[in-house]
Amino acid sequence: MLDLSRFHHRLQYADPIGEFGTIEKIVGNTIESHGPNVTMGCVCWL
């Protein structure tokens, strides 16, 4: 079995990068914005 405990430890203490942008338009389940630079399927907290 693959031991991933060293990665779990690194992720637990990682300092995530915060990026910000502004919402321009919401149509249905689609949100158009200026920044951050993400692609379809990425998770963004609004």
Image (tube, grey):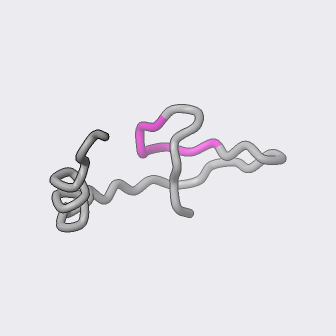
Residue 37 among magenta residues: yes
Tell me where residue 34 appears, x and y as whole percent.
49, 43
Residue 42 drawn above or below residue 8: above
Residues rendered magenta in the picture: 32-38
Quarter of the image with the N terminus is top left
Count of numbered tags? 0
Tell me where residue 12 appears, x and y as whole percent.
24, 66
> Which residue: 16% across, 57% down?
10
- Residue closest to the far front: 1
> Which residue: 51% across, 53% down?
44
Q: For this rendering, which residue is in front, 14 or 30?
A: 14
Q: Tell me if 41 is positioned left or right of 10 in this view.
A: right
Quarter of the image with the C terminus is bottom right
Residue 41 drawn above or below residue 11: above
- Residue closest to the far top: 39
- Residue closest to the far bottom: 13
Image quadrant in which you'd find residue 5: bottom left
Residue 41 drawn above or below residue 46: above
Q: For this rendering, which residue is in front, 8 or 21?
A: 8
Residue 34 among magenta residues: yes
Residue 41 drawn above or below residue 26: above
Tell me where residue 45 appears, x and y as whole percent.
52, 61
Image quadrant in which you'd find residue 17: bottom left
Tell me where residue 20 appears, x and y as whole percent.
39, 56
